[in-house]
Image (cartoon, rainbow, N blue to C red):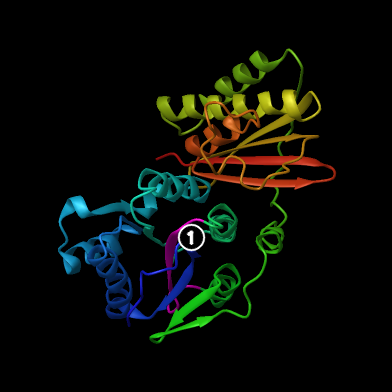
């Protein structure tokens, strides 16, 4: 299986690589990386740890020539991945087109994580449109549910399978895929009373969150991260969500926590928070960007009735 790394100037290429077993994986992904190295093109490989180790061993490439990243860390929150890919491409702009391997979905991901990773895959096409880069996305067709593989056909213009590269007839607009990812958010068991807040009460939100967090399994540092994330979300409510909002906090069975903020706002740009905001940006997005960096999963539902922002943190 030979995956070419070449594109025409200015082209963005985003194929899905459907592989079965480690041999096909190493052949397909390894061939992509070798072709990029032969062309002196910058390469980022962001795949789950076990796959990362196998690739490094099979390629035996000088460490300085490939940027290796464990996707289980980078992509624990799928909302963080896009910015990392863009920053890598930006660092090498003007040299050669960036070549990236990104595997955001692997067996064992939760349903919520898969939805956000699928959203990420769709938004790549918007964020990189017109940029000279190739992002190859491997999919384990034996280990992943059929629905995930089907969605990959909708988020990638081309598909590589059994040694052949074909156009994907199922490929569709990012807005359609993102709308399909907006599953209703499940309610916590037993119900959780909301903590209402309005203008001038950001301090009260912080104090309420900090007091509640002390009774959770979160360590000191993560409790601080939770308070900061909630504070940023509430500040957005006051500035952009109608001047008021409500906060709910609850524990998850695994020892993690969820913080949910609801307000009357609306997220007009689905890329907001997924791209690092410019220091001179006037469009905002810094708060949501920070929330993505602090949390292990971020779920957003935006509708005519308002905005729901759910922030998940694991205990480790």
Compared with 171, 116 (above or below) is above
Picture quadrant of residue 87: top left
> Label 1: how many residues lie within 10 Å, few (<14), some (14-19) or many (20+)?
few
Is residue 127 in view from this perspective?
Answer: yes
The residue shown at (48%, 37%) is 293
Could you say where residue 116 lies in the image, as x and y percent from the top left? Answer: 57, 55
Residue at image mark 1: 10
Q: Classify residue 181 as left or right of residue 110.
A: right
Which quadrant holds the C terminus? top left
Q: Position of residue 200 (x, y in %)?
A: 73, 12
Q: How many marks?
A: 1
Point out the image quarter for the N terminus: bottom left
Q: Nearer the viewer, residue 310 or 78?
A: 78
Q: Which residue is depicted at the point 28% across and 60% down?
A: 52
Left or right: 193 with respect to 146? right
Magenta segment: 131-144
């Amino acid at each position: 299986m030979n995956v070419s790394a070449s594109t025409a100037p200015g082209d963005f290429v985003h194929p899905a690589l459907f592989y079965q077993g480690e041999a096909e994986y190493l052949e397909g992904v390894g061939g992509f990386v070798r072709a990029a190295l032969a062309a002196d093109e910058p390469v980022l490989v962001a795949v789950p740890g076990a796959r990362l180790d196998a690739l490094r061993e099979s390629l035996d490439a000088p460490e300085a020539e490939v940027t290796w990243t464990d996707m289980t860390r980078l992509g624990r929150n799928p909302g963080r991945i896009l910015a990392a890919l863009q920053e890598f491409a930006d660092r090498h702009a003007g040299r050669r087109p960036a070549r990236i391997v990104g595997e955001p979905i692997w067996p064992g991901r939760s349903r919520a994580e898969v939805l956000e990773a699928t959203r990420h895959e769709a938004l790549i096409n918007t964020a990189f449109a017109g940029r000279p880069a190739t992002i190859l996305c491997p999919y384990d067709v034996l280990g992943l549910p059929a629905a995930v593989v089907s969605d990959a056909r909708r988020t990638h213009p081309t598909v590589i399978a059994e040694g052949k590269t074909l156009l994907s007839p199922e490929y569709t607009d990012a807005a359609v895929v993102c709308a399909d990812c907006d599953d209703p958010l499940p309610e916590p068991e037993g119900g959780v009373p909301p903590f209402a807040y309005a203008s001038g009460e950001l301090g009260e939100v912080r104090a309420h969150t900090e007091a509640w967090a002390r009774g959770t399994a979160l360590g000191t540092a993560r409790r601080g991260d939770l308070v900061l994330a909630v504070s940023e979300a509430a500040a957005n409510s006051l500035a952009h969500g109608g001047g008021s909002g409500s906060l709910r906090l609850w524990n998850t069975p695994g020892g993690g926590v969820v913080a949910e903020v609801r307000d009357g706002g609306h997220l007009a740009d689905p890329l907001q928070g997924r791209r690092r905001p410019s220091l001179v940006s006037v469009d905002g997005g810094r708060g949501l960007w920070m929330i993505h960096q602090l949390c292990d999963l971020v779920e957003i539902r935006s509708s005519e009735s308002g905005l729901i922002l759910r922030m998940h943190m694991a205990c480790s």
